[in-house]
Image (cartoon, rainbow, N blue to C red):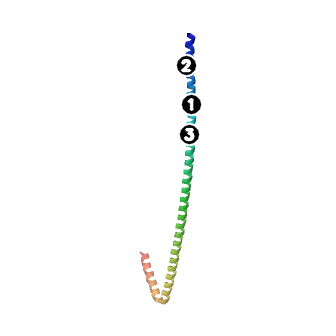
């Protein structure tokens, strides 16, 4: 009897050990499948992030080119406006010079009198 008792216990332990080994093998397969799924998800996520990064880079580059073009156009416009103002001032200066020369030629005594009064006024101011 003793042999039968030990043999049935040994058989039960052996069956239990075999069942545990099968469960461990199943767990290993499930863990490997989970690891593959996580790796696939990570790969897809990384690809998505790369695509988004490329799109953001392209958008930033396009915006920078747009700003550069606008800045260049604004600078050209300001230079053109400055050149126009300079031409207008030069024209006014030349016109004023012509008018002053004409006034001196037309009224030499009046011009001499104005210059003398201005000289006396300036001398009086500087003496104080």
Q: Residue at x 44, y 84 (%)?
A: 114
Sequence-wise, the earlier of marks 1 and 2 is 2
1 or 2: mark nearer the eye: 2
Q: How many numbered callouts?
A: 3
Image coords of residue 2 (percent x, y): 56, 10
> What secondary structure is marked by label 1?
helix
Q: Residue at x 46, y 89 (%)?
A: 109
Query: Mark 2 and 3 residues: CB-CB less than 8 Å, in contact?
Result: no
59 horizontally vs 110: left or right: right
Find residue 128 and report its image quarter. bottom left
Image coords of residue 16 (percent x, y): 55, 22
Sequence-wise, the earlier of marks 2 and 3 is 2
Label drawn at residue 12: 2
The residue tagged 1 is 26
**Relative to the observer, which residue lies in front, 52 or 33?**
33
Query: Mark 1 and 3 residues: CB-CB less than 8 Å, in contact?
Result: no
Image coords of residue 115 (percent x, y): 46, 83
State the CA–CA distance, disc 1 to disc 2: 21 Å
Give neighbour class at mark 2: few <14, some 14-19, many 20+ (Cα, 10 Å).
Answer: few
Q: Residue at x 57, y 15 (%)?
A: 7
């Amino acid at each position: 009897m003793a042999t039968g008792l030990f043999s049935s216990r040994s058989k039960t332990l052996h069956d239990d050990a075999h069942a545990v080994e099968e469960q461990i093998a199943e767990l290993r397969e499930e863990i490997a499948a989970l690891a593959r799924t996580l790796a696939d998800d990570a790969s897809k996520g990384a690809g998505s992030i790369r695509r988004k990064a490329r799109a953001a880079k392209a958008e930033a580059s396009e915006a920078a080119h747009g700003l550069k073009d606008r800045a260049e156009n604004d600078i050209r416009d300001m230079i053109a406006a400055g050149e126009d103002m300079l031409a207008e001032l030069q024209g006014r200066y030349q016109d004023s010079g012509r008018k002053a020369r004409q006034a001196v030629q037309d009224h030499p005594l009046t011009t001499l009198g104005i210059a003398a009064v201005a000289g006396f006024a300036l001398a009086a101011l500087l003496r104080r």
